[in-house]
Image (cartoon, rainbow, N blue to C red):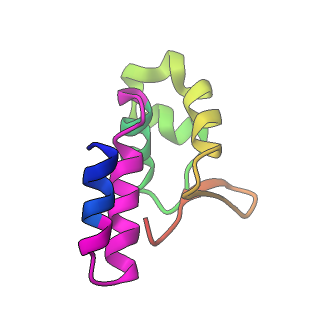
């Protein structure tokens, strides 16, 4: 999606929830395929750790540590108590 398309869609959005979803969709489109797959897998569970990601994505086992670190830097990923990370509910 081009920047002008993004701005056009944001301008046509009828509320904040719709605008947030448009921005989230755009942001997800900028992620590498492996990281996007990790985001999708981690959104299934209430919270996740590297071991859980490895169980869900065994074909990416050699990249799990790196992906877990990258997930920590995403704006919609947050710490979950002592257990690991989680995807924010609004995402």
Furthest residue toward right: 82
Residue 80 location, quadrant: bottom right
Q: Is residue 64 left or right of residue 26?
A: right
Q: Name the residue nearer the viewer: 66 or 81.
A: 66
Q: Is residue 2 left or right of residue 69?
A: left
Height in image: 50 above or below 14? above
Residue 44: x and y in percent read 38, 56
Residue 87: x and y in percent read 51, 59
Residue 19 location, quadrant: bottom left
Whether 13 is among the magenta residues is yes
Q: Residue at x 68, y 55 (%)?
A: 83
Specify the quadrant that holds the C terminus: bottom left
Span shown in magenta: 10-34
Residue 59: x and y in percent read 37, 20
Q: Name the residue nearer the viewer: 1 or 30.
A: 1
Q: Main secondary structure of the magenta part?
A: helix
Q: Residue at x 32, y 62 (%)?
A: 22
Q: Is residue 32 left or right of residue 9?
A: right
Furthest residue toward bottom: 15
Q: Residue at x 30, y 71 (%)?
A: 11
Q: Is residue 58 left or right of residue 4?
A: right
Furthest residue toward top: 62
Q: Residue at x 44, y 33 (%)?
A: 35
Whether 89 is among the magenta residues is no
How many numbered markers are drawn? Answer: 0
Specify the quadrant that holds the N terminus: top left
């Amino acid at each position: 999606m081009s920047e002008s398309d993004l701005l056009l869609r944001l301008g046509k959005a009828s509320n904040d929830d719709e605008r947030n979803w448009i921005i989230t969709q755009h942001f997800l489109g900028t992620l590498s395929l492996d990281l996007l797959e990790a985001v999708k897998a981690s959104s299934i569970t209430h919270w996740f750790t590297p071991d859980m990601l490895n169980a869900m994505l065994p074909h990416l086992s050699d990249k799990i540590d790196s992906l877990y670190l990258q997930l920590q830097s995403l704006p919609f990923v947050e710490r979950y108590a002592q257990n690991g990370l989680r995807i924010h509910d609004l995402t």
